[in-house]
Image (cartoon, rainbow, N blue to C red):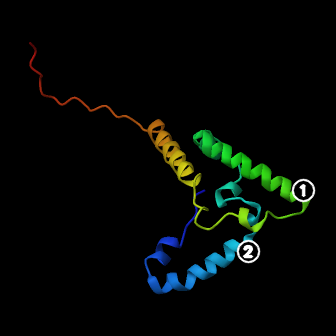
């Protein structure tokens, strides 16, 4: 899931944002997944171990909604039909719900690996005598 993004660069520059946003909206609309009622995070492959952990951390409602969207899209795909336009995913409801959890899991995994690979070195005793009580 670690990939470079131009989004922060584009969003900081208003002139570039005015040019890129219509292109971005066109791309997402032409991708077709919204016409099946899916969100962008529904398209993330589930085979990765970190994605599996992130899916387990979803709230029960969000997990249920995800399964519902996936099953409905599968049924539409089998029937070779699209949802009615009123049921398409709107751009304001297509927000990332899984990606922040995946990033959190990746950060935890990195921290765990760093802690497990840490080498502890003992300080050497200096020649000074320590007072005994």
Label 2: few (<14), some or many (≥20) within 10 Å?
Answer: few
Q: Is residue 17 above or below residue 98?
A: below
Q: Is residue 41 above or below residue 115?
A: below
Q: Which residue is mark 2?
A: 30
The kind of secondary structure element at disc 2 is helix
Q: Position of residue 52 (x, y in %)?
A: 65, 42
Which of 132 and 33 lies nearest the eye of the viewer?
Answer: 33
In the orientation shown, which residue stands out farthest toward the right?
Answer: 79
Q: Is residue 96 above or below residue 18?
A: above
Q: CA distance from mark 2 to mark 1?
A: 20 Å
Of callouts 2 and 1, which one flags the residue occurring earlier in the amino acid sequence?
Answer: 2
Label 1: few (<14), some or many (≥20) within 10 Å?
Answer: few
Which of 123 and 67 lies nearest the eye of the viewer?
Answer: 67
Q: What's the residue at 75%, 68% (across, down)?
A: 85
Q: Quadrant where the N terminus lies?
A: bottom right
Q: Position of residue 92 (x, y in %)?
A: 58, 66
Q: What's the residue at 79%, 52% (across, down)?
A: 72
- Classify residue 5 as left or right of residue 120: right
Question: Which label sits on residue 78?
Answer: 1
In the orientation shown, which residue stands out farthest toward the top?
Answer: 133
- Classify residue 130 as left or right of residue 87: left
- Classify residue 122 as left or right of residue 98: left
The mark total stands at 2
Q: What's the residue at 12%, 22% (across, down)?
A: 130
Q: Position of residue 119 (x, y in %)?
A: 41, 37
Which of 96 and 5 lies nearest the eye of the viewer?
Answer: 96
Q: What's the residue at 69%, 55% (across, down)?
A: 42
Q: Is residue 67 above or below residue 31?
A: above
Quarter of the image where one finds residue 118? top left
């Amino acid at each position: 899931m670690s990939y470079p993004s131009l989004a922060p660069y584009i969003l900081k520059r208003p002139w570039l944002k005015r040019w890129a946003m219509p292109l971005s909206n066109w791309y997402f609309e032409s991708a077709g997944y919204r016409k099946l009622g899916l969100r962008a995070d529904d398209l993330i492959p589930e085979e990765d171990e970190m994605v599996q952990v992130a899916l387990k951390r979803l709230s029960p409602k969000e997990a249920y909604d995800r399964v519902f969207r996936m099953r409905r899209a599968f049924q539409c795909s089998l029937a070779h039909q699209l949802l009615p336009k009123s049921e398409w995913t709107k751009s304001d409801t297509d927000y990332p719900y899984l990606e922040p959890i995946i990033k959190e899991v990746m950060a935890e995994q990195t921290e765990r690996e760093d802690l497990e690979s840490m080498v502890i070195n003992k300080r050497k005793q200096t020649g000074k005598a320590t007072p005994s009580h």
